[in-house]
Image (spheres, rainbow, N blue to C red):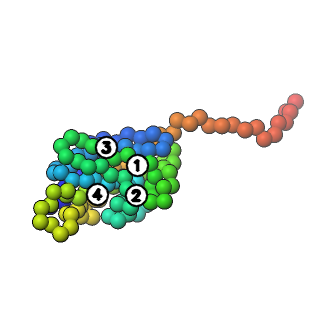
Amino acid sequence: TAPVVSISSTSSTETAIAVTLRLDEVGTAWCRAVRSGFAVPTTLEILETGFSASYSSSPVVVTLTAYDADGDPLQRGTDYDVYCYAEDDLCLGCRSPSGSSMAQVLATRTQVRTADTTPPKLRQITQESTA
């Protein structure tokens, strides 16, 4: 059977999201961030970004730095939905790994907002006297 993903925490910077998770068995987990309200990614869309971690017994961290396979960076101060998918690494006798169903992927949905610590830059365009 496919491993069950349990996300214990998330944290973010302006350019990255860190997802701390556990699996209920040995396996590999992949995660992907999509802008909040956008379509849920398919399994292949989660896998294509390559943000993964192998799990054996201790919690692992999957760090996301882009929201697509092209490497477009996460944007600061933006709401994202994070989805994770997992495969069984020790499926003896299996022709292919046992992976999460779409229902299991949907159950991992976690909302995260990237940080925005960059101060605004002001630029004076014109100056006019009011006296």
Between residue 79 and residue 43, name the one nearer to us: 43
The CA distance from mark 2 to mark 1 is 9 Å
| Residue at image mark 1 | 64
Residue 15 against residue 72 in the figure, above or below = above
Residue 85: assigned label = 4
Q: Tell me which numbered mark, 2 or 4, is placed earlier along the sequence.
A: 2
Between residue 19 and residue 121, name the one nearer to us: 19
Tell me the residue at 24%/41% (across/down).
Answer: 59
Q: Tell me which numbered mark, 2 or 3, is placed earlier along the sequence.
A: 2
Residue 49: assigned label = 2
Is label 3 in a helix, a strand or a loop? strand
Task: Name the kind of residue labelled 1 in the image.
Answer: Leu
Q: Tell me which numbered mark, 2 or 1, is placed earlier along the sequence.
A: 2
Is label 2 in a helix, a strand or a loop? helix
| Left or right: 91, with 130 as reference point | left
Which image quadrant is residue 96 in?
Answer: bottom left
Between residue 125 and residue 95, name the one nearer to us: 95
Q: Position of residue 120 (x, y in %)?
A: 62, 37
Is label 4 in a helix, a strand or a loop? strand
Disc 2, disc 1: CB below 8 Å? Answer: yes
Tell me the residue at 33%/52% (across/down).
Answer: 52
Q: Position of residue 45 (x, y in %)?
A: 38, 63
The CA distance from mark 4 to mark 3 is 14 Å
Between residue 25 and residue 76, name the one nearer to us: 25
Disc 4, disc 3: CB below 8 Å? Answer: no
